[in-house]
Image (tube, helix red, strand yellow):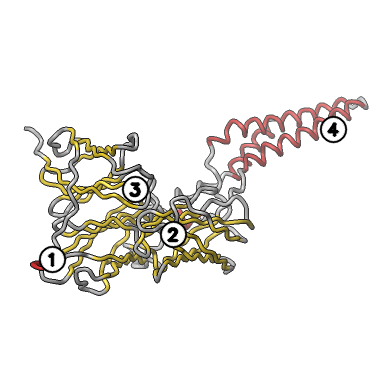
Amino acid sequence: MIRALLLAAVLVVMFAAPAAAHNVTAGADLRIAQTIAGAEVTLVIKGTSRVPGPLRIGVVAFERAAGLPVSLEVRSLTGGRTVKGVARAAADPEYAELRVEETGPHQLTLRAGDEVAVVPFRVLVDRGSAGDFLIYGGLFAAGLLLVGGLLTGAVSRRGPAMMLAAGAAAGVTVAAMVVVFEPMLPPGPPDGAAPTAQTQPAGGRPFAQARMETAPAGPAPGQEFTLRVDLTDGSTGRPVDDLVSHHEALAHVVVTSEDGRYFRHVHPLRTAAGRLEVRLRADRPGRYLVYAELEREDSGGQLLTGEFAVDGDPAGAATADLPAAVPELRPAVPVAGRPATIELPADGAVRPWLGMAGHLIVRSQDGSFLGHVHEMGTNGTRLRFTFSFPRPGRYLAWAQHATDGRIVTMPFTVDVAEPAG
């Protein structure tokens, strides 16, 4: 009996592989926001349950995206097989169904208008736990041994019968132990997961370094230009190509004019290894500030900053602004370093966007600080945020939420006081 129990413990340890990386989950949907063809969409790759089998891909429409056709091309990076399809963006999309033949690394190429994005992902299938093998194996062995014991006892061979009965009891014990202790063990990686050595390097990965530039280098007001972010590894200098989806995007990029009258919250396309691009237009000349929020696998989130200039004569610039929102503040004058509640009425029925009901982006007036928090979960007619302003002074703020067909942006300013004493 003791030997059987020890064997069970050894087998459990042998079969319990380290947990896969936090962004690898078999059966879960992968959602990635994209700003493409002048529209805001969310790409959805549905989780797969079997391979070979269907892979369903849809495009959820947000701003200026309803009806946008998106061509899809999925290629296995292991076997090279390529399948194609088309999805049309909609608030409640119909999913294109493509067939995949193997698990592991794949590449999805999206085309909308004349823009192309290349999204790496993995097809994962849950292989079942080692515990299942031990549970059913133990019960099966116990059943065989019990039948053998009964047959042996029937012919009056008590010694062997008792040994077989003891073996059956050991099998039941092993199964029972696994049922009790399996939830405490780390799950094994699904089929198609990256090797552990790649997903969990010793000490984690360093933060990414960013180079930001525009093409053309000095865009004119009203001219479309491409904002490009090139990411490199801080220790090797190689392109960073291991971004994980956080808040349903590979990267969140915020672009504001120095005076705050221009604001964009966009989600760039991955166009090559370590390269993110998004097309924009700026309506006035001057200095523009760029903030990129991203998360590198096994490295955590980080905020990268940059800037660019739009050429032209400031005297002839457009001056139209969005009407300022009037938030309800508690306290009425927030104090630096202390939580403040910011509440605004929603402009229409709220749809979840980027996994949240609403977003609040806060920038210090000089641009040295950017904060981003999420809505606290109200009833859908109002947005409520809690935020601690780090220093006294004036802050520029933008509250955002999604409705049917558009992203609503509500700009306002907040003056923050010094703490008393």
Amino acid under disc 1? Ala
> Mark number for residue 67?
2
Q: Earlier in the sequence, mark 2 or mark 3?
A: 2
Along the horizontal axis of the image, is 144 left or right of 248?
right
Along the horizontal axis of the image, is 17 left or right of 109?
right
| Mark 1 to mark 4 CA distance (whole Å) | 92 Å
Counting from the top left corner in percent of width and height, residue 279 is at 31, 66
Question: What residue would you read off at disc 4?
Answer: 148
- Closer to the observer: label 3 or label 4? 3
Q: Is residue 204 visible?
A: no
| Mark 1 to mark 2 CA distance (whole Å) | 34 Å
Dividing the image into 4 quarters, which one contains the C terminus?
top left
Q: Earlier in the sequence, mark 3 or mark 1?
A: 1
Question: What residue would you read off at disc 1?
Answer: 317
Along the horizontal axis of the image, is 137 left or right of 305?
right
| Mark 3 to mark 4 CA distance (whole Å) | 67 Å
Question: What residue would you read off at disc 3?
Answer: 402
Please name whichever residue, 222 or 235, is drawn nearer the observer in this view of the structure. 222
Q: Earlier in the sequence, mark 3 or mark 4?
A: 4
Counting from the top left corner in percent of width and height, residue 273 is at 40, 67
Amino acid under disc 2? Gly
**Secondary structure found at label 2:** loop
